[in-house]
Image: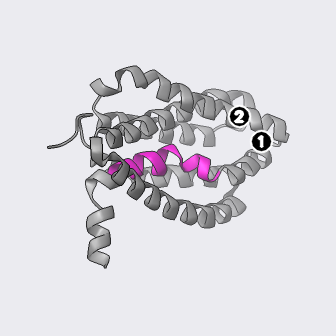
Amino acid sequence: MLNKFKSLYLNREVLGPFAAIYGVGFAPLLILPFLFTALINHFAISAAQAGVLVSIELGAMCIGSLLVAPIIDRIANKYLALFGAALAILGNLLLISTESITTSYPYFVIAGLGYGFTLAAGNASVAALGERSAEVFNRVILLGTIMMIVLLNVFPRIILHWSLPGALIGLAVLHCLLLPALFSILASAQPSK
């Protein structure tokens, strides 16, 4: 049974998109309620101001995906995912260095663009599989569900002890741990033969 699971779920067609979509792209969304509280506590701001910060990052994520959508078939998905992950990590680490809400805006944009680029690359790599894309995406969703359960059990404890810096470092560590899986994304948007 374990061998069957490994062959179906732990192969490069599934792991690469899983890392891009859930491990990087959706990761901050999966812990958003806890991240929201950490923003309020760290910057000593209101819920409305924290909502603006989250909206900036989500807006940048959408813009990032929209920017690459017209040219996604001409970009190597692996490199786009790695570039996006690097931006997300950089944005999160820069956010740790600021105590001011005003100086945090560009860092949320950097992280959001990175999340958007990586998410677009992961989705494109699944779509490039043609007829097999639905089957592979179902497997990606199962791994994503497992990741969500893990993140929802780990990140509240991290945030309780280390607030926003802990959450951002935790996200950066998660993204770094998944870099090898991002390398496994098919380099081309064309399906493998």
Name the residue at the left extreme: 193
Color encoding of the figure: one colour
What's the residue at 50%, 27% (across, down)?
64
Say if 64 sits above or below 160 in the image: above
Residue 38 seen in this snapshot: yes
- Counting the numbered discs, the total is 2
Residue 36: image location, x then y, percent:
73, 47
Residue 117 forms part of the magenta stretch: no
CA gap between label 2 and label 1 equals 11 Å
Q: Is there a contact, CB below 8 Å, between mark 2 and mark 1?
A: yes
Residue 62: image location, x then y, percent:
55, 30
Q: Residues within 10 Å of mark 1 (few under 14, many from 20)?
A: some
Q: Which residues are magenta?
A: 16-31
Query: What amino acid is found at the position of numbered circle 1 in the picture?
Result: Phe
Mark 2, secondary structure of its residue: helix
What's the residue at 39%, 42% (across, down)?
122
Q: Label 1 belongs to which residue?
A: 43
What's the residue at 85%, 40% (across, down)?
46
Disc on the earlier residue, 2 or 1: 1
Q: Label 2 belongs to which residue?
A: 53
Name the residue at the bottom extreme: 1
Residue 42: image location, x then y, percent:
75, 46
Query: What amino acid is found at the position of numbered circle 2 in the picture?
Result: Leu
What's the residue at 27%, 34% (across, down)?
189
Q: Nearer the viewer, mark 2 or mark 1?
A: 2
